[in-house]
Amino acid sequence: MSGPFPVENATVPYWRTQLHHLDSHRSTPELPEKQDIVIIGAGFAGAAIAHYLLKDHPDNKPRPSITILEAREACSGASGRNGGHIRPDLFVGLAACMQAHGLEAANQAALFEEANARALEALVREDNIDCDLRAVTTGDVFVDAAEAAKIRKLWDAMAKLDCPTLGRVAAHLDPREAERASGVRGARVAFTYPAHVVWPYKLVMHLLEEAVVAKDGAVNLQTRTMVHGVSEALDGDGYWTVATARGPTRARTVVFATNAYTAGLLPEYDEAIYAARGAVCRVVVARDGVAAATDNSSSSSSSSNNIPLGSAGLEMESPNTVDSYYGLRADGSILVGGGKSVFIDEREEWYRNYDDSTLIEATVPYFDGWAARTFTGWEGRAETESIWTGIMGYSADDAPHVGHVPSKPGQYICAGFNGHGMPNVLLCAKGVAEMIRDGRAFSETGVPALYETSAERLRRISDLVAAPTAGRARADIYLKF
Ligand SMILES: Cc1cc2nc3c(=O)[nH]c(=O)nc-3n(C[C@H](O)[C@H](O)[C@H](O)COP(=O)(O)OP(=O)(O)OC[C@H]3O[C@@H](n4cnc5c(N)ncnc54)[C@H](O)[C@@H]3O)c2cc1C
């Protein structure tokens, strides 16, 4: 067994401090001998695929039998340990995507991310999901002088192009205005736009509860069930055999919602999706501190904790790094992720590192001083309440892989969401559910063409990885949270 595979004794993220009753659930004591569909992975992607398979299932057809196999606890991977912000990339990410894939593809991806945010908002409202979803104004804030100069030029250039999402972005190009709008010390340029923050574990667990409990046990959830592999070929009855730590089970359809760990089961994705370790912490007002808890909700106006934006990515250094990002919670605490500047050169700390049972030590002092360094009025007032690591599934060409696994009929993938899954996963999952249930072609799902996985794309990635600039390209991809 080579991996990557989820490890034991993962660090405990703030989001997983109030565990749901399905966290370590097994619907049946034994695995079913066979079923129609096995979904591997109970993160946002696996839960959302199950949700959509059931939600839109026609009443006049029997429901498929579905089992979710999860190596650890439900939502214990990236979805339970991320920064909790949902930031459709309307400008900076759009520009990066345009450089790599062209304007049309970039516009499609940006509009898709916005559509994800709308779909999530509607889902939370309609299903009355208790997951602290809040609309906020977010920002991309540039402190580094060289990066600020570059981004100003990029803004001017992009403004001349036909980019529908740019209309939702406010540019604060004057340093005083950038600092006022963002609240970030020394900000030179800031771009602000609509986004959300969420408690991701609560969201995912609601989707699982609905699939596993509310729909009369339609989905069999099996946590603490590591999958070791899937057979090379279908058996005589048309089933794939899924080998697990608790014995084999068979399925006509197998879905890999395994994100960072995909190559452990599909070695052909080893170059395409690789593990990258990241760190997040929760910063709270120190007991004797006075920075008041506040609800910044959708407002971008100044508030008593001196933080005008509900979330942001901060570009502190050149070249092209989003050094940290944060999201504010209604209780006044701040979820801060990143800190790459202090460990990016120690490649073994993050690159192909899938150990979320240990911390990235250099981030501990980094996060301790983060609030005071970043915002005025936070000196001596903030402390790190908890800190953890998580494993991202980095995609070598920066786009998720969605659709049919090449040459394996009945196998699907929905993985490789980088550090940016929250504004992408939901509608990718819906697309995969439609492909499985309705036999839809990928092109009919509304998922950007760029995200379609294929043998040709895997071949192109192989060429990219073999290119002399590969090391640099990979580092840059990591830099783009
Ligand atoms: C530290 C960190 C910060 C992040 N911050 C943000 C953010 O603020 N905003 C944002 O948009 N995105 C963020 N992301 C990315 C986001 O969390 C992911 O893109 C998203 O959660 C991916 O969801 P998923 O379901 O595909 O993956 P996961 O949640 O990782 O789910 C995959 C599941 O598959 C299971 N699994 C894997 N292999 C096997 C196997 N062999 N057998 C059984 N089960 C298996 C895993 O245990 C896991 O539970 C962050 C990620 C990390 C790690």
Image (tube, rainbow, N blue to C red):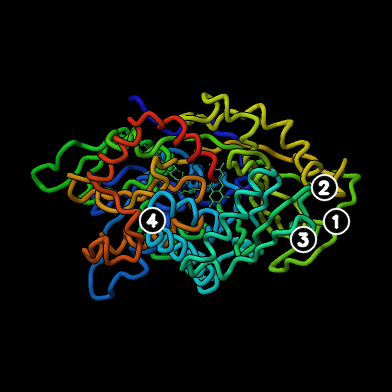
Where is mark 3, residue-wise?
A: 177
Q: Nearer the viewer, residue 292 or 57?
A: 292
Q: Determine whether, in the image, residue 331 is placed left or right of residue 476.
A: right
Q: Is residue 97 above or below residue 468?
A: below
Distance (Cα) linking label 4 and label 3: 32 Å
- Which-is-in-front pick, marks 1 and 3? 3
Q: Quadrant of residue 31?
A: top left
Three-letter amino acid code of the residue under disc 2:
Val
**Labelled disc at residue 292:** 1
Disc 2 under 8 Å from ligand 1? The reply is: no
Helix, strand, or loop for circle 2? Answer: strand
Distance (Cα) linking label 1 and label 4: 45 Å
Q: Determine whether, in the image, residue 373 is placed left or right of residue 464.
A: right
Distance (Cα) linking label 4 and label 2: 44 Å
Q: Determine whether, in the image, residue 444 is placed left or right of residue 325.
A: left
Query: Do tag 1 and tag 3 residues touch (Cβ < 8 Å)?
Result: no
Q: Decide: few, some or many residues near mark 4? Use Cα within 10 Å; few <14, some 14-19, many ≥20.
A: few
Kindly identify the residue that appears in the image at 33 percent across and 25 percent down.
1
Disc 4 under 8 Å from ligand 1? The reply is: no
Where is mark 4, residue-wise?
A: 102
Where is mark 2, residue-wise?
A: 285
Query: Do tag 2 and tag 1 residues touch (Cβ < 8 Å)?
Result: yes
**Labelled disc at residue 133:** none
